[in-house]
Amino acid sequence: MKGYYRHSLFGVLSAAVMSLVALASCSEEQGGPVNAADDYVELRMNVSTRAGGDGSATGYAGGDRENIHSLCVMLVDADGTVAWRFLDDNVSEDAALVEFLSDPINIPQGTYNVYAFANFDYYGDLWSQLERLDVGSSFDAEALSGTTIDDPAGNIDLDNGRFIPMSGKNIKYLVTAATRIIPVSLDRLVAKVQITIGGGSYKSVRRLTFSGWANRVALFGDGTPDGVQLDGDTTIAVSAAGASDEIVVSPFYVNETRQGTPFTVVVATEESTAGTPSSVYTAQTASKELLRNHIYPLNISVNDWAIDISARCWVSPIGSYPVQVKADFEPDTYTISIPEGSQFEFTLNGLDNVPGSKCIWNIDPVTTTGIVFEDGHASDNVVKGHVTASAGNTYRLGVVARWSDGGNNYERNYTVIINTTDISDAEFMSGVGSYATRYGLRRLPAEVVNVRRNVQ
């Protein structure tokens, strides 16, 4: 399958290839003859999937169909020559094998490199090259270090036998007369994301998207992939059916990402009140990388938090000072109605009951036509300006809320909607002149997405 990897994996095969009798099946083990000389050692190869908890491993224990299905193991001597090879395209039908132990092999004492590859049988060109690397072949480790695998997460299909690709190596392993086992551990090239959705409004969530992960990875963990783009995204439909206090989303795989950029979580909700449209909210994770062979638990909490926002509005009759009019944000909406041609001042006072929170305006005065902003722009949490003298217009102003909790940073976007009405419908505040009264404290609707990382 072309396009699955970049660069040549092993270079030109040596002309001096040792010929063995081919096996009829797709399973094959090759090695040197038994030698009774003192410098030869009888030992076994041990290949296992990494699991957390023992101090030396870096990943997680695989669940159903997350372990070894096909396997290729290369033992390479100090001269870069394949001294022993095992290859089987179906060592475990359902990728259930956690540990592989070879038959006894006899090799000279010395220093060896071990390379192991699991579940690459559906990467056609790469697997074919592995099949051609017989004992005695030249093994190009330098080319190996530059190999890039395109989107392994996107190619996984457990139901159709496309299991998680894994790789591992054990470099400069010294074989002595006392050696009985050469170990090598496999790392999955992907991370697994496990998401739960809770909070006061969790039942309103209908869809989520997790994005910002890499489109390709290095074959081995210490390699550097080329041409990486952080454009990976996964969208999942969500249902609260049967959920008691939280929604558990089916786990999914993403490619290893090491660029140090926060990931984006977008949650789409559908309110229970008839006629209320769906809303989309965005948050960024505190975590900036997803290492291969790791589980990343995310707890998304959708809570009824709101913004404090105050409003003042004035009209200026010809020949008179500006006069304040009644203008208020409608309860539980983003909407305020003000007279055509009026001046306004909106102040964001932070999130309700969230100490240290900050809300700022996010407005592009160039694209927001029909409003003349004071000084040409919105300043931090205060926006001032006036609308054109035309009723029936609608304007949208962006708001960004930011806060911290438990060492993590959170962000949510709101939209405030301004409708202009006929000035003859304005209701004046009697006895109140220009800039006389602080007025109109209201709260915006109540969906907040807090992304928390749970460390295991």
Image: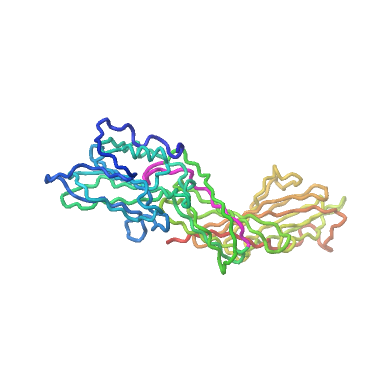
Where, by quadrant of the figure, is residue 138 drawn?
top left
Residue positioned 38% across, 56% down in the render: 96
Q: Quadrant of residue 368?
A: top right
Of 300 and 159, nearer the camera is 159
Colour scheme of the rendered structure: rainbow
Left or right of residue 4, residue 423 in this image: right
Image quarter (top left, top right, bottom left or bottom right) of the C terminus: bottom left
Residue 159 in the image, given as x and y percentages of width and height: 48, 52
Asked if 229 appears above or below 271 in the picture, the reply is above
Specify whether residue 167 is painted magenta. Answer: no
Magenta stretch bounds: 204-224
**Total count of labels:** 0
The residue depicted at 44 percent of the width and 49 percent of the height is 161
Image quadrant holding the N terminus, namely top left
As drawn, the residue found furthest toward the front would be: 24
Q: Is residue 189 visible?
A: yes
Q: Foreground residue, 297 or 65?
A: 65
Residue 420: where, in percent of width, then height? 80, 52
How far across and down, in percent of the image, does residue 8 sit? 38, 34
The foreground one among 18 and 381 is 18
* Direction from residue 228 to residue 207 in the image, left or right: right
Residue 441 in sight in this render: no
Q: Is residue 442 left or right of residue 227?
A: right
Depth check: 155 or 377 in front?
155
Looking at the image, residue 215 lies above or below residue 328: above
Q: Is residue 223 magenta?
A: yes
Horizontal and vertical percent position of residue 449:
58, 59
Q: Is residue 159 left or right of residue 181?
A: right
Outermost residue, top direction? 15
- Residue at point 40%, 41% (across, down): 224
